[in-house]
Amino acid sequence: MEMTSSTMVKPVPHPLVGEKVALTIFDRAAADVFVPTLLVYLAPAPANEALKEGLLKAVAAYPHLAGRLTVDQLGRRFLHVNNEGVLLIETTVQANLADVLVEGRMLTRVDHLYPKPEVLINRWRHCFLSRLTSHEKIGAALLQIQLNRYKCGGLVVGICSHHHTADGHSMSMFFTAWATAVREGEDFTMPTPSLDRAKTVVPRSTPTPVFDHRSLEFTNGNGAAAYAVIPMDRIKNLMVHFTAEFVADLKARVGARCSTFQCLLAHVWKKITVARGLKSEEFTKVRVAVNCRGRADPPVPMNFFGYASR
């Protein structure tokens, strides 16, 4: 792999540029990490220049992505919508994309295909996402993109975005806008997402707390765990394909009505507990994030860009 370009691209300034947006309770409850995403396209794929032009159009509608995390005088984080830009890296790979794909899965490690979010003056120093210090995340580009162009013309787009900036639903909206901008070119109509984070956290006139959120979501991982913590270097990503026949058989063994998601989650979690060497009577739990936009009262607009998942 050869890096051919590394630059900070800045969209046309949004009316919100200059705003200092306080992190909401949902933002602060989110994991303080950069989330990597890979998008794979076999040849023919759009040219890098078309991707950059589409990126500038899409980011213009989502100004938080071109901002930076910073802290106020009291040490509290906030989003500075300062239009400092998005980090865009271009690389070339001397291989055919089809040769490193099997059933849509990369045969090799993929951590070289997306940027390593860290202090930008040292952006190519190898480090795991989980090992970034809080200081290193302050001032770094909140959206970092790497365009990996293969010899055959295929493309792998590696993306890292900070979780305090947007949840999965929000990033999906942005990805859709970017793809649409590339396809439509001059005919692209800029989306108008809901960007007012303060409206999503208006408290009841008389606070009536029901759940112990402070102990569950805001422990920062410092609470004493009742089970052995697995070192990060022992955790790997694994892609598994379940056939329709396997899923049908699994559901039939449940003996009650359940969704495919519930059935497979229970099956996978059972296998994970076995792999961890836990005894069958030991208590474990798995947390699944859900989109809270429609669950909130009053509901949050579905086109809200920010963090509204728990």
Image: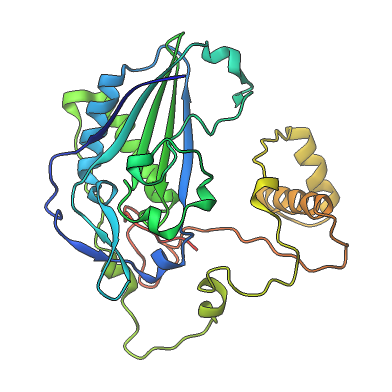
Q: Is residue 216 above or below residue 251?
A: below
Q: How many marks?
A: 0
As displayed, is residue 147 above or below residue 166? Answer: above
- The residue shown at (59%, 18%) is 100
Residue 109 placement (x, y as % from top left): 60, 29
The part of the image, by quadrant, that contains residue 245 is: top right
Q: Position of residue 175 (x, y in %)?
A: 36, 38
Whether residue 131 sits left or right of residue 83 in the image: it is: right
Between 262 and 153, the one lying in front of the other is 153
Q: Residue at x 69, y 71 (%)?
A: 225
Q: Is residue 214 left or right of residue 63?
A: right
Residue 42: where, in percent of width, then height?
48, 16
Residue ID at (35%, 91%)? 206
The residue lying furthest to the bottom in this view is 206
Check the image and report above or below for 269 versus 240: below
Q: Give the residue at x 15% y 55%.
A: 16
Which residue occupies the extreme top position in the image? Answer: 152
Q: Is 228 on the left or on the right of 192, as rendered?
A: right
Left or right of 51 in this view: 102: right
Residue closer to the observer: 220 or 38: 220
